[in-house]
Structures are given as C-alpha cells and as structure tokens.
Image: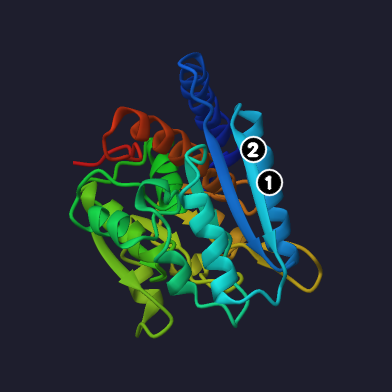
Amino acid sequence: MAARVVDGKAVSAKVRGEVKVRVDGLRARGVQPCLAVVLVGEDPASVVYVRNKSKAAQEVGMEAREVKLPKDAHTADVVKAVRALAHDDSVDGLLVQFPLPAQVDQRAVVDCLPPEKDVDGFTFVQAGRLLRSEPALVPCTPAGVMRLLAECDVKVAGKHAVVVGRSLLVGKPMGLLLMGANATVTTCHSRTADLPGHVGRADIVIAAIGKPEFIQGAWLREGAAVMDVGINRGDDGKLRGDVHYASAAARASWITPVPGGVGPMTIAYLLQNTVEAAAARRDKRPPSTPIPGLR
Ligand code: GUN
C-alpha cells in the first residue's frame, strides 16, 4: 500500500480559521485574547518556535506578548516573571518555552502557572482533569494528533494504538486521549522489549521517541496509520521525524510528513487553547480543549 500523506499545514490552517472566528467573536464583545510566552536564554530552536507562536497568534487577531530573560536567569527570576503574567488580567494564555536552562527548576516554574491560563496543559489541575476524563486544557501536540486522525477519517474506537514515547508533553496525554476515544492503547518507550513486535500489532502508530528515523517501515502492519511527532534536526540541517519515512510510506495507509505534518498542529492547538482560555475565563467555566472522538 502506498500511504496517503496527511497535510498538516492544511488542517492547521483550518483550525486557525476556526480560532479566528472565535477571536473575532470575543473582540466583538470587547475581549482581546492575549498569549504570553516566556523565553529564557537564546536556544536557536526555541527562539524560532517562540517567534512562530507569536506570529501565529497575531495572525488570528490575538495579542502576543514575549517576555525574554537572559540565559543565566535563576529560578526566582523566572518565577517572578511568570507570577507577574499570572496576575495580569489582560493575559489569557501563558506558556514557558521549554527546555529551560539547567539551573532553572522546571517544576517550580510549572507550579506557579495558573491552571486557567495553562495552555500547555502541564499543571496538576489540567493534567489531573485529563486523567479524570474531565474538561481540560489538553497539551497541544496530542490534541493536534487527535484532530489529524479525525480529519483523515481514521477510526480510533476499538482500534489498537501504539504510542512510542512517554513524555508529559506528548506520550502520556496521547495515550489518555486515545483511551478516551475508545482505542486500546499500548505505550512503548526506550526500554520496551521487542518494540518492532508491538509496533507491528498497531492499527495506529504515534511516534514520539525523539530518535531520528528510528521506527522502520518493515515493523509496520500493512495499512497502519502513522503519526510522526518527531522533529530532529540532522547535522546536514535537515529535519527528520522519528519514522523512516520512505519505508513507512510504502506500508502505511496514512503518514504525516516531517516537516508539514504534526508540527503545524501544535501551534494551531496552542491558539485553540488560548482562545478557549479567554472565553472560559469570561464565562466563568473551566476551559476545555475540543477533542474529536472523545467519549
Ligand atoms: N518546547 C517544545 N515543545 C514545547 C511545547 O509544546 N510547550 C512548551 N512550553 N515548550 C516546548
């Protein structure tokens, strides 16, 4: 089977269009949604990500605020900056770009994020709500993957999904969302015995292990849908996913390219979470990322 290629850019544009309609509606009520991003240091990839997030926010009519701290900032400096934005009533969505420099205590920073502005879904409250199948701000990348599956009409209920990766950002919430959509979920990781065997039993493979071209097409069941979350920059400057694209595309039913697959969905759902946080705060209800297929 030659896979159909998932057009993440097109689906992302569709989601951003939906967000813009909601932003326009809020602005008509006199509410200006605002995303604030805290960047510590000058990690080149993070600088680009933050710039792209701000630009995308402005394109849908949001205000984008960037707070930049030097690379030698201490935990207390970052906490102070986050607390100021937490208490700023004009800020709806607040995120701290990761990774943070080694001297900064990431957990202390996350713990001072106000849950109702936590558009990454990292706080105890939002992560706990997701775990309990309650309305939550859901981490952007797994939310985007759920939307891609729905847009490609890949049925999730009753299917076997294999998630490769167990991070707070992707693997764990991805497994919860797929379970919530009635998939049978296997979570694999770097210490899993017989990874090819597990991947070979999957109807849906989510690759989020952070190793370039690690998952081989020969491992896949014929007709599996493959969502590649990996973004690995090689020494040649080229971006590669976690899946060996050419061999996987020969067996899969659907495959996401890198770049242009899952990546654009992360920003689209960041905007979705920000407009939802803005609306929910005004309506005095808990924010809830719209996820297709949840029970
Ligand atoms: N760094 C890489 N991906 C992300 C993300 O989704 N959120 C944050 N805050 N930092 C990141």
- The span from disc 1 to disc 2 (Cα, nearest Å) is 6 Å
Circle 1 — which element? helix
Q: Quadrant of the C terminus?
A: top left
Residue at point 36% right, 82% down? 192
| Mark 1 touches mark 2? (CB < 8 Å) | yes
Instruction: State the residue position of label 2.
Output: 56
Image quadrant in which you'd find residue 290: top left
| 96 is higher (above) or lower (below) than 218 | above
In the drawing, does residue 225 fall left or right of residue 58? left
In the drawing, does residue 42 fall left or right of residue 270? right
Q: Tell me residue 148's x, y (percent).
A: 45, 41
Q: Residues within 10 Å of mark 1 (few under 14, many from 20)?
A: few
Residue at point 52% right, 32% down? 33
Residue 99 visible: no
Image quadrant in which you'd find residue 74: bottom right
Residue 58 visible: yes
Ligand 1 lies under 8 Å from the Cβ of mark 1: no
In the drawing, does residue 87 fall left or right of residue 202? right
Residue at point 31% right, 40% down? 288
Circle 2 — which element? helix
Q: Tell me residue 95's x, y (percent).
A: 52, 54
Task: Name the disc covering residue 52, or none.
Answer: 1
Which of these two is toward me, 92 or 216? 92
Three-letter amino acid code at disc 2? Ala
Q: Tell me residue 195's x, y (percent).
A: 39, 77
| 171 is higher (above) or lower (below) than 67 | below
Q: Tell me residue 91's x, y (percent).
A: 51, 41
Residue at point 54% right, 49% down? 262
| 162 is higher (above) or lower (below) than 116 | below
